[in-house]
C-alpha cells in the first residue's frame, strides 16, 4: 500500500519537475546566446580548439586556431566557465586574435527569437515526446512494472535531451545535472531491459550495480568540484560515456539473448520488435551524422534533424509494453534488413551509373552516403504515399466489391434474426454484397422450402437448374463446388445435418463480383452458419406448430369437458323435469280417468243385486280399477311427491319418512332446527334437498343394514344443512373415487353433482364398521 | 250458514280436470237438494265464483295449477268465512289432511268415492253440527292424524288390547313383518295383491297405534309374549 502511494507520489513529483525544468529551460534559452567555442590553454594562451557552426562564436567569425586574448575584458583564465570547462559561455565580449588578422573585439548578442526557436524546437520536442510517451504508457498500464520502468527511462532521457542545450550554454548546475542525468540513463535502460525480459538476470543486476556506482562517482566528483576541490574535471565527461557504452552493450546483449529464445516465447518476438525499432530509430542518425563525422566529411543533415528519428525508439518500446499481441517482429527485422541491403546495393549501382553519365564527378563515400540517404528518403516517402493511397482506395472506391467480406460477415451475424427464410437469404445477399443467392432446405419428414434473392428472384429457369443440381449433389454427396461457364451460380455450398439438408447457391455468373479462392473458406463458414440458422428456425417453427396443435387440442378437450359438465347438470335437471312432466301427465290424465271410472263403477255396482253374475264380474273389474289407480298414484308419488310442491320440504320429508318407516324395518329420527315446518325455499333447492334425503335413506336401506337413521335438517347462516347418520356397515371411503368410474352407487354421485351445481357442498365420511355420515349444505 | 232441506244446497265444483269435473256435476245433478251453481278450473276462477254465486259448499280439488289446494282454503275463507270446503284428492292424502284441517277445511273425500258418499259429505258439512267428514277409504290415511293428534289416549287404550283387535289375516301378515319381509314379499308369500298388503299393513299400524313398522313389530311381539304368559 505504502509502496503504491510512494510510487504514485514519485510519479507526480517527476512530472511536475519535468514541466518546471521545461519552463525554466525555455525562459533561459531565449535569454542566453550559445557561444559554442571550445578553448584550450596552451602555454597560457587560450586557443580555440573547436568552433560549433551553430554557435554565436562561429557566426561572429571565430574559427578553430584563433586565440582568445580576453573574455569580458579580462584574462580568460579568470573567467569561471573558461577556467572550469574550457568554454566561453555567458561572456558578453571576446577579444580574439586570428592568425594573419588584427586583434578584434566581438560583442556576443542574443540571436533573433525565431532563430532560437527554430534551432532549439526539434530537440525540445524530442525530449517532451520522450516524456509524454512514458507518461501515456504508465497511465494506460498503471499496474505494469514494465510500464513504470519505461516511464522512468523516458522521463530521464527526455530530461537529458532538454537539458543538453542549456548545459551547452554553461548555466548554473545545468552541466552538472546533464552529466548526472546522462550517466543515469544507462542505469535505467538496463533496468528496463532486465524488467522487460521478465527474468531476474544476475549479470544484469551486476551491471546495474556497476553503472549505479559510476553514476554515484560522477555525482561525488561534481559535488566535490562544486565545493572547491579541483579535479581534472574535463575527464568527468568520459565517465558518462563509459556508462553509456556499458549500457548499450548490455541492452544489445539482452536483445540478442531474447531473439535466440525458442519461437514459442513471446519475449522473442518482443525482442525482435524492439531491435527493429532501435534500428529504424538510429539508422538515420548513423547514416546522416555518425558516419560523416567518422570519415570527417561534411554533415549531410543537421544532427538535430537526424536525431528526430530517435523518437521511433521510445514509441516502439511503449508499443511493445502496451500491447499483448504483437505483429511478427522477425518479419519487421527481415524486411528492414532486406530493404537496407537492397537499398545499399541499388544505391551503389545508381551512384556508379550517375558517375558514368557524368552527373557525379567524384566517386567517394561521401557522395554515396548522400545518394543513399536520398534513396532512403524517397523510399520512405514512396511507401507512405502507397499506404495512404491504398487506404483511401479501400475506403472510398472499392467498398462495393467483395474486399470487405470479413466485416460484412460480422455485420451479418450482428443483425437481429428473422424467422422468415426468404428474408434471411435476402439479408445474406445484401450483407455480403452478392448479386444473388438461392437456398434450398428440406428435412426428412418431407418439409421443403426454397428461397431466392437478388438476381434469382423470379427467375424460375435458373432456379430449376439449380434445384436439379441440388438433387443430384445431395444424392452423390457432393461438397463445395465452384462453377464456371454456363451454370447460373458461382458457388455451391451444401449443409447437411442429421435430419436437415440445405443447399446454398451463391453469386451469379453474370455478376461482376467474383469470389477469390481465399474467400471460399469464409463464405463456407458463413453458409454453414446460415444453414444452422435455417435449421434452428425450422425446428422452432415445427415446435411452435406442434405447440399450437396441442394447445388447440387441449382447449378442445377443456371445452368438451366443460360441455360435459353442463350436459351432466342439464341431464340431472332434465331428469327431474321429465319426472315432473310424467307425474303430471299421469296424474292429470290417466289417474283422473281411472278415478272417474272407479266412481262410476261403484255407482254401477249399487244397481246390481249381489247374487247376479254381472255383479261378480263388475266388482272384479272395479277392484282392478282400484288397483290400477293405486299403482298410478304410487308412480306419481315416486316421480314427484306433490306434497313437496304443496306443503314444502319438511312436511314432504316427514311424509316420505313415515311411508318408509311403514314399509321398512327402519326408525328414522328427524330433527329440524332453525326453521319452522312451513318454511319454503326455492323449488330446485327443496327438490335437491328432498332427493338428497331420499337417496340417502335408500342407500341406508339397501347397503347399511342399519335399523336406525338420525337425520338433522337445520338452517344456519342462510344454508340448509343436512346430516344423515346411520350405524351400519360403513365402507372404505377410498372406494368413492371408483364409484363414478364403475357406475356403482350412481345415486350418491348424482347427489353430489346436483348439490354442487347449486353451489352447495357434499361430503361422505365413513369407516368400515362405523356407519356412514352424509353431509350436505346448500345456500338458500 | 243455516240451510233448510227445502232450499237446495249451492255447490261449486273446482277441478282442473274437465272430464272429472263434468262427471262430478252429472253425479250430483240427480240429487234434487243439491244444485251445482258453477265449476271452476283453477283457483282464481273459484274465488270469482265464491264471490258471485255465494255457494254453501265448495268441492275443492287439492291439486290446482295456480294455487296449492291448501292455500286456496284460506283465500276462500277470507272472502266467505261461512262457506264449507270439502277437499277432493286423487292422491294419497298423507300430509294434506292436517294442513287442510288447520286451514279450515271441513271434509276430505277421495276422488273415487261413491255418489252417496259425496252427497253424504255435502249434507254433513253443511249441517249445523259442524262435523268433519272423511272418506271411508281414508281410514288408513287418517291414522297419522288420529294417532298423532286427537286420539292419543284412545290409541293407548287400543294398544293394550291390540292383539285381540287384529284379524287372522292381519296377524298372519304381522308375523311375516316381524320376520323382516317387505310388503311385496308378503304379497308374494300370501298370494294376494300388493294393494291388499299395503292396506292391511296400514290397518295393522293404526290398530297397534304404531308410527313405524318397527314399532308395530315391537308392540306386537311384546303383546304376544304377554298373551303367552297369560294364557
Image: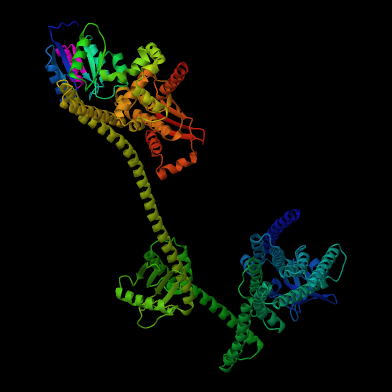
Q: Residue furthest front?
A: B231
Instruction: Compare residues A283 and A711 and report the one nearer the observer.
Output: A711
Question: In which quarter of the view is residue B150 placed?
Answer: top left
Residue B205: image x %, image y %? 37, 21
Query: Where A480 falls versus B143 (above or below)?
Result: below
User: Left or right: A419 with respect to A49?
Assistant: left
B55 is higher (above) or lower (below) than A29: above
A185, A104: nearer the viewer = A185
* Residue A75 location, quadrant: bottom right
In the picture, the quarter occupied by the C terminus of chain A is top left
How was the colour assigned to the protein in this rendering?
rainbow
Is A136 above or below relative to B166?
below
Q: Is residue A679 among what the camera can see?
A: no
Residue occupying the point 67% across, 64% down: A134
Q: Quadrant of residue A757?
A: top left
| B124 magenta-colored | no
Q: Which residues are magenta?
A: B42-59
Residue A610: where, in percent of width, then height? 18, 22
Q: Main secondary structure of the magenta part?
A: helix
- Left or right of A274, for residue A84: right
Q: Residue at x 64, y 72 (%)?
A: A312
Amino acid at each position: 500500500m505504502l509502496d503504491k502511494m510512494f510510487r504514485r507520489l514519485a510519479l507526480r513529483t517527476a512530472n511536475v519537475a519535468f514541466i518546471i525544468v521545461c519552463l525554466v529551460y525555455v525562459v533561459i534559452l531565449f535569454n542566453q546566446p550559445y557561444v559554442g567555442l571550445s578553448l584550450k590553454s596552451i602555454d597560457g594562451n587560450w586557443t580555440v580548439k573547436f568552433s560549433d557552426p551553430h554557435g554565436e562564436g562561429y557566426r561572429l567569425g571565430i574559427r578553430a586556431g584563433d586565440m582568445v586574448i580576453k573574455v569580458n575584458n579580462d584574462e580568460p583564465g579568470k573567467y569561471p566557465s573558461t577556467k572550469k570547462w574550457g568554454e566561453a559561455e555567458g561572456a558578453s565580449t571576446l577579444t580574439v586574435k586570428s592568425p594573419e588578422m588584427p586583434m578584434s573585439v566581438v560583442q556576443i548578442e542574443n540571436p533573433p527569437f525565431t532563430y532560437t526557436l527554430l534551432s532549439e524546437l526539434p530537440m525540445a520536442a524530442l525530449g517532451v515526446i520522450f516524456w509524454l510517451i512514458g507518461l501515456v504508457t504508465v497511465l494506460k498500464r498503471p499496474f505494469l512494472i514494465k510500464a513504470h520502468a519505461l516511464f522512468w527511462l523516458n522521463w530521464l532521457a527526455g530530461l537529458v535531451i532538454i537539458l543538453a542545450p542549456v548545459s551547452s550554454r554553461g548555466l548554473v548546475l545545468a552541466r552538472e545535472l546533464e552529466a548526472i542525468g546522462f550517466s543515469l540513463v544507462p542505469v535505467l535502460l538496463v533496468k528496463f531491459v532486465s524488467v522487460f525480459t521478465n527474468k531476474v538476470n544476475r549479470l544484469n543486476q551486476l551491471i546495474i550495480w556497476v553503472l549505479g556506482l559510476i553514476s554515484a562517482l560522477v555525482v561525488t566528483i561534481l559535488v566535490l568540484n562544486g565545493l572547491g576541490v579541483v579535479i581534472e574535471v574535463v575527464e568527468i565527461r568520459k565517465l558518462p560515456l563509459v556508462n553509456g557504452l556499458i549500457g548499450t552493450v548490455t541492452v544489445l546483449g539482452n536483445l540478442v539473448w531474447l531473439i535466440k529464445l525458442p519461437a514459442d516465447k513471446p519475449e522473442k518476438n518482443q525482442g525482435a520488435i524492439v531491435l527493429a525499432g532501435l534500428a529504424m530509430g538510429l539508422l538515420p542518425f548513423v547514416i546522416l551524422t555518425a558516419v560523416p563525422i567518422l570519415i570527417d566529411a561534411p554533415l549531410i543533415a543537421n544532427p538535430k534533424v537526424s536525431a528526430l528519428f530517435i523518437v521511433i525508439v521510445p514509441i516502439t518500446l511503449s508499443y511493445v509494453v502496451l500491447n499483448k499481441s504483437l505483429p511478427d517482429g522477425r518479419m519487421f527485422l527481415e524486411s528492414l534488413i532486406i530493404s537496407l541491403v537492397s537499398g545499399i546495393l541499388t544505391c551503389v549501382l545508381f551512384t556508379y551509373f550517375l558517375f558514368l553519365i557524368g552527373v557525379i564527378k567524384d566517386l567517394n563515400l561521401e557522395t554515396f552516403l548522400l545518394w543513399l540517404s536520398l534513396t532512403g528518403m524517397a523510399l520512405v516517402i514512396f511507401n507512405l504515399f502507397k499506404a495512404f493511397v491504398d487506404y483511401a482506395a479501400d475506403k472510398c472506391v472499392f467498398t462495393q466489391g467483395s474486399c470487405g467480406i470479413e466485416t460484412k460477415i460480422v455485420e451479418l451475424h450482428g443483425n437481429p434474426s428473422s424467422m422468415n427464410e426468404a428474408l434471411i437469404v435476402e439479408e445474406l445477399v445484401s450483407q455480403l454484397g452478392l448479386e444473388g443467392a438461392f437456398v434450398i432446405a428440406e428435412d426428412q419428414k418431407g418439409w421443403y422450402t426454397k428461397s431466392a434473392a437478388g438476381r434469382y428472384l423470379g427467375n424460375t429457369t435458373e432456379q430449376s437448374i439449380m434445384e436439379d443440381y441440388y438433387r443430384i449433389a445431395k444424392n452423390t454427396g457432393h461438397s463445395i463446388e465452384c462453377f464456371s461457364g454456363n451454370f447460373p451460380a458461382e458457388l455451391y455450398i451444401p449443409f447437411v445435418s442429421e435430419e436437415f439438408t440445405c443447399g446454398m447457391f451463391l453469386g451469379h455468373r453474370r455478376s461482376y463480383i467474383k469470389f477469390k479462392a481465399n474467400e471460399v473458406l469464409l463464405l463456407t463458414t458463413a453458409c454453414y452458419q446460415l444453414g444452422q440458422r435455417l435449421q434452428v428456425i425450422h425446428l422452432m417453427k415445427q415446435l411452435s406448430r406442434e405447440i399450437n396443435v396441442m394447445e388447440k387440442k387441449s382447449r378442445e378437450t377443456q371445452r368438451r369437458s366443460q360441455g360435459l359438465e353442463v350436459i351432466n347438470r342439464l341431464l340431472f335437471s332434465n331428469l327431474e323435469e321429465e319426472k315432473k312432466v310424467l307425474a303430471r301427465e299421469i296424474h292429470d290424465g290417466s289417474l283422473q280417468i281411472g278415478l272417474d271410472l272407479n266412481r262410476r263403477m261403484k255407482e254401477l255396482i249399487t244397481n246390481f243385486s249381489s247374487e247376479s253374475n254381472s255383479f261378480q264380474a263388475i266388482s272384479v273389474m272395479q277392484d282392478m280399477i282400484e288397483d290400477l289407480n293405486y299403482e298410478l298414484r304410487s308412480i306419481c308419488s315416486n316421480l314427484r311427491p306433490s306434497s313437496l310442491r304443496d306443503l314444502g320440504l319438511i312436511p314432504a320429508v316427514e311424509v316420505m319418512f313415515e311411508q318408509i318407516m311403514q314399509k321398512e324395518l327402519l326408525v328414522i329420527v328427524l330433527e329440524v332446527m332453525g326453521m319452522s315446518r312451513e318454511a319454503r325455499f326455492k323449488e330446485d333447492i327443496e327438490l335437491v334437498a328432498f332427493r338428497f334425503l331420499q337417496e340417502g335413506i335408500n342407500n341406508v336401506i339397501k347397503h347399511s343394514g342399519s335399523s336406525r337413521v338420525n337425520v338433522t335438517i337445520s338452517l344456519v347462516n342462510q344454508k340448509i344443512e343436512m346430516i344423515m347418520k346411520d350405524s351400519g356397515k360403513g365402507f372404505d371411503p377410498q372406494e368413492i373415487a371408483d364409484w363414478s368410474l364403475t357406475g356403482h352407487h350412481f345415486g350418491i354421485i348424482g347427489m353430489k353433482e346436483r348439490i354442487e351445481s347449486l353451489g352447495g357442498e357434499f361430503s361422505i365420511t365413513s369407516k368400515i364398521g362405523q356407519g356412514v355420515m352424509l353431509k350436505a349444505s346448500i345456500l338458500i | 250458514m243455516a240451510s233448510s232441506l227445502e232450499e237446495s244446497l249451492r255447490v261449486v265444483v273446482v277441478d282442473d280436470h274437465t272430464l272429472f269435473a263434468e262427471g262430478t256435476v252429472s253425479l250430483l245433478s240427480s240429487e234434487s237438494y243439491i244444485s251445482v251453481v258453477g265449476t271452476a278450473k283453477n283457483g282464481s276462477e273459484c274465488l270469482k265464483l265464491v264471490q258471485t254465486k255465494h255457494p254453501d259448499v265448495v268441492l275443492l280439488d287439492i291439486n290446482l295449477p295456480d294455487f296449492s289446494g291448501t292455500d286456496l282454503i284460506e283465500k276462500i275463507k277470507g272472502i266467505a268465512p261461512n262457506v264449507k270446503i270439502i277437499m277432493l284428492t286423487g292422491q294419497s292424502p298423507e300430509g294434506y289432511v292436517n294442513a287442510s284441517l288447520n286451514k279450515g277445511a271441513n271434509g276430505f273425500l277421495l276422488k273415487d268415492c261413491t255418489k252417496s258418499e259425496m252427497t253424504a259429505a255435502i249434507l254433513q258439512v253443511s249441517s249445523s253440527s259442524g262435523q268433519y267428514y272423511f272418506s271411508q277409504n281414508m281410514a288408513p290415511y287418517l291414522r297419522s292424524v288420529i294417532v298423532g293428534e286427537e286420539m292419543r289416549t284412545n290409541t293407548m287404550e287400543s294398544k293394550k288390547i291390540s292383539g285381540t283387535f287384529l284379524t287372522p289375516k292381519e296377524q298372519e301378515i304381522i308375523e311375516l313383518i316381524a320376520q323382516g319381509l317387505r310388503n311385496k314379499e308378503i304379497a308374494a308369500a300370501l298370494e294376494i295383491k300388493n294393494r291388499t298388503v299395503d292396506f292391511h299393513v296400514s290397518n295393522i299400524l293404526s290398530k297397534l297405534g304404531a308410527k313405524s313398522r318397527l314399532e308395530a313389530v315391537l308392540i306386537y311381539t311384546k303383546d304376544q309374549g304377554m298373551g303367552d304368559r297369560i294364557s
